[in-house]
């Protein structure tokens, strides 16, 4: 399985007030804090496991729980074609 | 507190070598000169970034008629971390221009076709350009930039929607926008000829639904509804002066690309006043901001924070009052204005003139 990455034409950034947003061809998508924290780690190098581990450590949460949140979000982003690799179970 | 705008539509020029009868550009195209030069546009980009703008849409007219200026503006926007989207009909997208734009940091190209087949498409474009557009599409898809294929739907081409979807599939397009024509500018002038029948719209909607299911995960299809046939109006611009602003070729700042038609408002110019000042303080921007300006039936309607009373420009163009409920709304006392148009006629289309 390839590490997930933002699709071509999709960028993440923070707006002036710190809000995490996804800039996509269709417009500007506001992300909530947990979604922004996940998307920020999508660099095409980190695997889903690595992302889950990093976030689990940062927020002191169980990796399995974080992992399922990450997979859910990636699944939704993949449906809109905003991430290049769909989250598939290993 | 006035909200921050998210997107800026920069209309570089209203000039265009095509003559689409549905063009939303104003009829008095020559009134928008002189055009802002590249330096002025770069200043607009700087001011937009300071104002919190995240996306810049470069359009017109045909923005690639100013290739050097276009590249400079994209480069400046990229430097300010603004996402850039080029809206083009593609007839001037040479390899050289594409490469320069990608190098400048262009994020996305929206390329429009007038239909799936050359003969019909060219009859609306007013020139033999379909093949050249397809060639541009192929070359754009090969580059490091995202591409959306767009087709405006109207009575004359909407029955060919399946062929447009098939064409997109054949070319490996990942994003397709199918947009029912909106009636502003030349489009309003040609409304009688452009407005599809309800049956045509229903068939097209069914085609889109079928294709979405079939192509899920391979192609994202966005569909702009035909508001004349909806129960409620479109949430135009997500509310007047709430998220979007437009700078016309001559520097006039508008809350909506069609707003210059509203003769009861005066629009300020970036040559004379800063973008942030205009956004916050211009009388035209504040005229229909929020919901306080609304009269009945909008005032007491539970959808007023959903569709914001519809489109101010459409309200003005059809009723003469920009503060009226959009006649596209079934609750509008002037909904008959839309119904009467929808009865349909086969008037001739007047090609857009430069
Ligand atoms: S809609 Fe047609 S005529 Fe109008 S600017 Fe676009 S390509 Fe040119
Ligand atoms: S009455 Fe006004 S607010 Fe209510 S649905 Fe119609 S346009 Fe929207």
Image (cartoon, coloured by chain):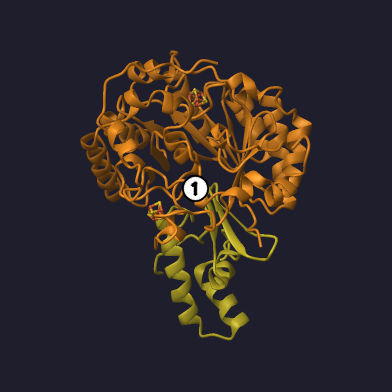
Chain colours: A yellow, B orange
Q: Is residue A43 visible?
A: no
Ligand 2 picture quarter: bottom left
Q: Report the residue marked by disc 1.
A: A26
Q: Quadrant of the N terminus of chain B?
A: bottom right
User: Residue drawn at (37%, 21%), measured in percent from left and top?
Assistant: B121
In x, y percent, where is residue A60?
Answer: 58, 86
Q: Pointer 1: residues within 10 angstroms few (<14), some, or many (20+)?
A: some
Instruction: Classify the position of the C terminus of chain B by image quarter.
Output: top right
Q: Please state which of residues A9 and B346 is positioned toward the viewer in this rendering.
A: B346
Q: Is residue B183 above or below residue B350?
A: below
Question: Could you say which is closer to the camera, residue B164 or residue B44?
Answer: B44
Looking at the picture, does residue A37 appear above or below residue B304? below
- Could you tell me which residue is drawn at 49 percent across and 30 percent down? B24
Residue at 48% across, 40% down? B321
Q: Quadrant of residue B45?
A: top right
User: Number of marks in the image?
Assistant: 1
Q: Is residue B157 left or right of residue B62?
A: left
Q: Is mark 1 within 8 Å of ligand 1?
A: no
Q: Position of residue A23 (x, y in %)?
A: 57, 53
Work out whether residue A28 can be spotted: yes
């Amino acid at each position: 399985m390839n590490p997930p990455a933002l699709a071509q034409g999709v960028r993440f950034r923070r707006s002036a007030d710190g809000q995490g947003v996804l800039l996509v061809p269709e417009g500007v998508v506001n992300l909530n804090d947990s979604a922004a924290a996940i998307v920020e780690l999508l660099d095409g190098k980190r695997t889903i496991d690595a992302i889950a581990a990093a976030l689990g450590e940062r927020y002191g949460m169980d990796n399995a729980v974080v992992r399922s949140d990450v997979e859910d979000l990636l699944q939704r982003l993949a449906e809109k074609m905003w991430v290049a690799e769909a989250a598939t179970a290993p | 507190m006035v909200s921050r705008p998210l997107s800026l539509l920069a209309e570089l020029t209203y000039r265009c070598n095509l003559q689409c009868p549905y063009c939303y550009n104003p009829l008095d195209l020559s009134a928008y000169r002189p055009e802002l030069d590249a330096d002025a546009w770069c200043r607009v980009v700087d001011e937009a970034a300071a104002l919190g703008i995240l996306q810049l849409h470069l359009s017109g007219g045909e923005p690639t008629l100013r290739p050097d200026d276009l590249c400079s503006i994209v480069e400046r926007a990229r430097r300010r971390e603004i996402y850039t989207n080029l809206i083009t009909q593609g007839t001037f997208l040479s390899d050289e221009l594409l490469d320069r734009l990608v190098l400048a940091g262009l994020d996305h190209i929206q390329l429009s076709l007038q239909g799936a087949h050359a003969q019909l498409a060219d009859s609306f474009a007013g020139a033999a350009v379909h093949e050249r557009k397809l060639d541009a599409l192929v070359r754009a898809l090969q580059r490091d930039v995202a591409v959306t294929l767009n087709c405006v739907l109207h009575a004359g081409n909407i029955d060919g929607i399946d062929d447009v979807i098939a064409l997109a599939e054949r070319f490996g397009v990942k994003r397709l926008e199918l947009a029912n024509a909106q009636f502003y500018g030349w489009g309003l002038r040609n409304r009688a000829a452009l407005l599809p029948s309800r049956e045509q719209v229903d068939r097209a909607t069914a085609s889109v639904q079928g294709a979405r299911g079939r192509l899920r995960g391979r192609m994202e299809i966005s569909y702009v509804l035909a508001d004349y046939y909806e129960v409620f109006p479109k949430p135009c611009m997500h509310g007047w002066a709430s998220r979007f602003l437009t700078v016309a070729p001559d520097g006039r700042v508008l809350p909506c690309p069609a707003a210059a038609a509203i003769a009861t408002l005066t629009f300020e110019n970036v040559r004379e006043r800063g973008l942030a000042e205009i956004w916050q303080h211009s009388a035209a921007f504040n005229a229909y901001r929020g919901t306080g300006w609304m009269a009945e039936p909008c005032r007491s309607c539970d959808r007023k924070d959903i569709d914001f009373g519809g489109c101010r420009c459409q309200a003005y163009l059809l009723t003469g009052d920009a503060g009226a409920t959009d006649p596209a709304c079934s609750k509008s006392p002037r909904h008959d204005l839309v119904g009467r148009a929808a009865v349909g006629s086969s008037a001739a289309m007047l090609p857009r003139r430069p």
